[in-house]
Image (tube, rainbow, N blue to C red):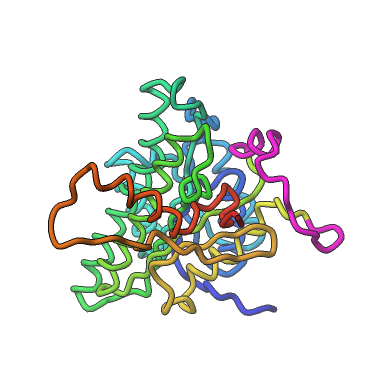
Amino acid sequence: MQQQICKDRVVVITGAARGIGREYALEFARQGAKVVVNDLGGKSDGSGNASAPAQEVVAEIAAMGGQAIANFDDVADWEGARRMIQTAIDHFGGLDVLVNNAGILRDRTLANMTEDDWDAVIRVHLRGTFAPARHAAAYWRDESKAGRQRAARLINTSSSSGLYANPGQANYAAAKAGIASMSIVAARELGRYGVTVNAIYPTAMSRMTEALFAANHFKHLEAAAEGFDQLNPANVAPLVAWLGSEESGDITGRVFGVRGGRITVAEGWHAGPRIEKAGRWDAAELGAQIPALVRKSAANADVSGEIPQH
């Protein structure tokens, strides 16, 4: 039998009943982890709820000989997030890995977006990453201070939209950009407690991405081995499982892209070309300076993450 790299590790996965989250749950179980399958069971726009989808994943894991329990709490609810983390501690005796994956979409252009569209997406993605992460971080801090430091892993979900700015998704992009930055901050804060923090931006087919792929936002998929579906969400799971293992202890504060068989390390904002004088600029001076400064800088990446060639 192949080595199980997450043997007996306790993992909480949010939004784990369908799509990419379901594949995470199954892969962690294959790797020997004990899994809390969290999912509110709502629609892709965040409406509704149902317990059956999460229970079905738990049944799949049990059928393969693994251990799992369902949790139906709202990730963005403070007490719900606390209960979710406590479920792992009470049922499996601790927590080693939190994968924040839950999300919704309400795509509109900025001029058409409603207040509710904005608030709902920011709530589920950004608050719904912060709340579980905060309760997990407090647990890991307390364990460390008590002399029981765990090889803990926090894995958050950003998006190419948040990093590379996909039109029509201002709410989603703002949340996902925030998650990427928050992950780096958390990595710098939590390392002292034995916690690594990384984020991923996956490209895969799911309920949330069907419309984007239908609109040809991802036209240029490289040639792949015959029979290999580059958009299968299962392609993303091995990296996430590895990041959740003890093997990944030297990797923290990074954002990884996964698409098909490709894994990319995103390189974030950094200071580029500059101008400087010994004193305050006069606004009238800048017309002769700023255009030339911008010409010296790299262009923003396109929606695929590539720098356009001039």
User: Does 120 sit above or below residue 252?
Assistant: above
Range covered by the magenta-colored residues: 207-228
Magenta-colored stretch includes residue 222: yes
Residue 78 at x, y = what percent?
27, 41
- Quarter occupied by the C terminus: bottom right
> Which quadrant of the view contains residue 226?
bottom right
Residue at 63%, 63% (x, y): give it. Answer: 65
Q: Nearer the viewer, residue 186 or 213?
A: 213
Is most of the magenta stretch helix, strand or loop? loop
Q: How many marks?
A: 0
Residue drawn 38% across the image and 56% down it: 293
Left or right, residue 209 beside residue 87? right
> Image check: 270 left or right of 262?
left
Residue at the image point whose x is 25% and y is 47% from the top: 285
- Residue placed furthest toward the left: 279
Does residue 58 appear in this view? no
Q: Which quadrant would residue 97 be assigned to in this image? A: bottom left
Residue beneath the point at 23% across and 67% down: 141
Residue 192, x across and y down, in percent: 25, 74
Depth order, front residue of 228/98: 228
Image spot of residue 265 (x, y percent): 52, 66
Where 55 sits versus 191, above or below?
above
Q: Is residue 172 above or below residue 236?
A: above
